[in-house]
Each structure stands twice: as C-alpha cells, then as structure tokens.
Image: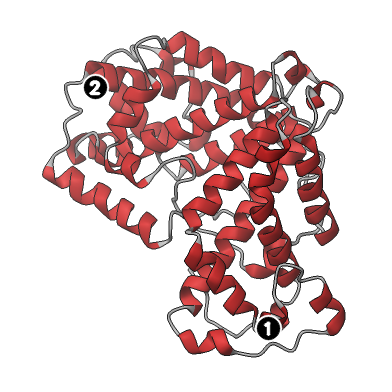
C-alpha cells in the first residue's frame, strides 16, 4: 500500500457508514448465496496467482482478481473493528494472559471448533493482536502485485516468506467472522460500541476518508517511480480504453494498480495539504517562483494562476469534492482493468481527472516553492 503508515490503523476499503456498523459489512459479504468455502476459495485464487506465472490470464479480466483483493481487505478491516468491540474486556484479559509469540499464532489448533462462538472470539483476538491488520493488508497487496506482474514496485518482494502463514490466518479469519455474523447473538451494537465506532468514524471523516500516510508531497516520486512514468501510465490508461481484450496480449496489469494507487496518493496528499492551507486563505495568494520551463508543463493552470497554483488547486477541490475525484479514479482504474473496449464518449469522462493529475504530478516536483507548513497529519 503506497505510503500508507505501517504503524497507524486506518481504513482503505470501508466507508464512514461501514465503520458505523461492521456487522452489516460482514452480512453483505456473507450474503445468502456465499459459503465459507466459496470465500476461502476466492482467497486461495488470490494467493495462487502469485506462484503461477500468468495464471491471472485465465480469468475474464484482471479486474476479477482486483475485486477479490478489495473484498478480502474489506472483510479484514471490518473484522478488525469487531475485534475492538468484541469480545468483552473480561475475555480479552483472559486471552492476553496466555498470548503466544507471533510465530506461534498459527498452528493446527487454530482450525479446531471455529464454529463455536466463544472459541471464534478467542481466535479473533489472537489473530488481530499486535496490529496484524496492517500486515495482512500489506501482504495481500504484495501478493496481488506479484500475481499481476507489476514489475514496478519499489523494493524486493518477500511474498514467498509470508504467504503460507498469511493464507492460513486469513482463511481462519473468514471462518471466524462467518461464525460471528451467522450466530448473530452478539451482533447488536451497545451504547459503548457506538461511542467507540463513532470515534473511528469521526477520525476517518476528519481526514476526508484518507488513510494515514507516512509520506508527504515529496513522496509522490520514489526510487522507481519517476515523473515521466507517472505521466506515461496516465496517457496509456486513456489509450487502453479503446481496445478490446487488451490484457489478452499485455502481461502487466499489476503496473496499473501500482500506479493508480500512486495517483490516489497524489490526490489525497494534495487534498490534505490543501485542507490545512485552506484554513489560512491568505496562503492561496502566495506567489511561487516557478521557473519558466516548469511553468510551461502546467497545462491545466491558466496564465493568470501560473504563479499562484494554490488558487488552481483550491478551485479544483472546492468545485469537485475529494470523494468525487476519488470515485472517478476508481471507475477509471476498473475500466482499464476490465478488458473491455469503451466508447470515446465514456473515455473522455476521465479527461478532467487526467489533466488534474498531470498538473499535480508537475506541481509535486516544485515542492521547494510551496509555503512551509507543519506536518499535515
């Protein structure tokens, strides 16, 4: 997960409404026609692609696997919220007295009696202790990128070192969460539950639905993420929409996912910065000393705003809410991964987003010109 903090709990696949009642999220995932075995099989498919080269090509599109990944993360994030409100502190205290070392969390006994609610809760606490949600989510993302042949992410892959234990843990969590939601005895939220969940929701809303990032504006580029690559993939993602069965002849859909996560980061980190800047409207009038060569690349900025880019950014985020930009980016990403051809009129729906992102990418290289602010977190 690009630049998402490893140390802070945040949500990437839940909405504010979801956070208010994670039991409803599980009820949605475990619909009437979804079995535990079926969901575990989907999880297995996600892990399988990481070890069978080009196995993803047997699917209708890469989007099928990407949606499985999102579903798994959604389930894990909802499960973490339930871990925070269930079971009672009495049982949590009892479990904590005998909590094993992380390396001993998964053993044969974890698969015994998971259909018993009390045992399921005990296993839930053990599997989510020590910020394991973060590791589950990061490792799933690595597995997805490995399986979809990204070949552009920074750092070496460590998928082979974690995959077996992670599969066993997530497989067990699927059974545990199914037991909890199907049993239904303990699914009503108490007053104390709502207070705690509303705290998570308020924190989520205060950040505009953004996760907690370790990086800042300077982290839009990285060791293997260059400005030219970011702009090039944007242009290519427009062209892909004009082709049917594009992924039948191109082998790296993981690259799309990697870069679109970086575009999401650019949108959200600029929004977080703008949200703080906007508290002092005077900063919007700051004149930036932008070199002429770089100024020519800011194609989305009018001549009047070229020395005051925050006026341009302010106009974009005031006119179109972050949630709408984010949703357009999601729709574009899924369209690119869908393996379908789109009419020209549909592809142009993403043009304003494309231009905005190109401008933000250019501005990210001009951080020395920015007004100095304290950390935006």
Which residue is more in the foreground, 34 or 133? 34
Residue under label 1 = 304
Q: From mark 1 to mark 2, how far is it between C-alphas?
A: 65 Å
The residue drawn where x is 70% and y is 77% is 367
Q: Position of residue 9 (x, y in %)?
A: 44, 51
In the image, farthest residue toward the left: 191
Residue 301's image quarter? bottom right
Classify mark 2: helix, strand or loop.
Answer: helix
The residue drawn where x is 42% and y is 38% is 77
Q: Residue 85 vs residue 142: left or right? A: left
Classify mark 1: helix, strand or loop.
Answer: helix
The residue drawn where x is 47% and y is 71% is 275
Which residue is more in the foreground, 145 or 24? 24
In the image, farthest residue toward the front: 345
Q: How many marks?
A: 2
Q: Position of residue 127 (x, y in %)?
A: 42, 32
Residue under label 2 = 118
Q: Is residue 52 visible?
A: no
The local crowd at label 1, few if under 14, some if 14 to 19, many if 20 or more residues have their Cα within 10 Å, is few
Q: Position of residue 199 (x, y in %)?
A: 27, 55
Which residue is more in the foreground, 204 or 1? 204
Query: Which numbered disc, 1 or 2, marks the residue that appears first in the sequence?
Result: 2
The local crowd at label 2, few if under 14, some if 14 to 19, many if 20 or more residues have their Cα within 10 Å, is some
């Amino acid at each position: 997960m690009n630049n998402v903090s490893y140390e802070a709990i945040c949500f990437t696949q839940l909405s504010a409404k979801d956070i208010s009642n994670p039991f409803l999220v599980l009820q949605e995932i475990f619909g009437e026609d979804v079995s535990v075995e079926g969901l575990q099989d989907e999880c297995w498919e996600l892990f399988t692609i990481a070890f069978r080269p080009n196995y993803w090509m047997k699917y209708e599109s890469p989007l099928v696997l990407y949606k499985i990944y999102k579903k798994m993360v959604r389930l894990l994030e909802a499960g973490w919220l339930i871990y925070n409100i269930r079971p009672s502190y009495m049982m949590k205290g009892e479990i904590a007295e005998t909590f094993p070392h992380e390396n001993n969390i998964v053993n044969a006994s974890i698969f015994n009696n998971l259909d018993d609610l009390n045992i399921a809760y005990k296993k839930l606490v053990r599997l989510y202790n020590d910020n394991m949600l973060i590791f589950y989510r990061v490792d799933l993302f690595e597995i997805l990128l490995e399986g979809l042949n990204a070949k552009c992410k920074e750092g070496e892959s460590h998928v082979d070192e974690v995959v077996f234990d992670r599969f066993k843990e997530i497989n067990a969590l699927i059974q545990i969460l199914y037991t909890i939601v199907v049993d239904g005895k303990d699914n009503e939220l108490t007053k104390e539950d709502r207070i705690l969940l509303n705290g998570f929701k308020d924190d989520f809303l205060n950040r505009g639905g953004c996760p907690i990032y370790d990086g800042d504006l300077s982290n839009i580029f990285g060791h293997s993420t260059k400005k030219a690559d970011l702009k090039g993939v944007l242009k290519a993602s427009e062209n892909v929409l004009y082709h049917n069965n594009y992924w039948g002849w191109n082998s790296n859909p993981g690259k799309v996912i990697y870069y679109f996560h970086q575009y999401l980061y650019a949108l959200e980190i600029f929004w977080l910065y703008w949200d703080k800047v906007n508290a002092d409207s005077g900063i919007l009038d700051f004149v930036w000393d932008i070199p002429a060569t770089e100024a020519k690349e800011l194609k989305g900025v009018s001549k009047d705003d070229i020395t005051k880019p925050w006026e341009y950014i302010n106009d974009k985020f005031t006119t179109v809410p972050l949630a709408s930009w984010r949703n357009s980016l999601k729709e574009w990403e899924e369209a690119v991964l869908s393996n379908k051809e789109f009419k020209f009129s549909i592809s142009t729906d993403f043009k304003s987003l494309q231009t905005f992102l190109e401008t933000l990418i250019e501005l990210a290289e001009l951080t020395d010109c920015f007004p100095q602010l304290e950390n935006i977190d």
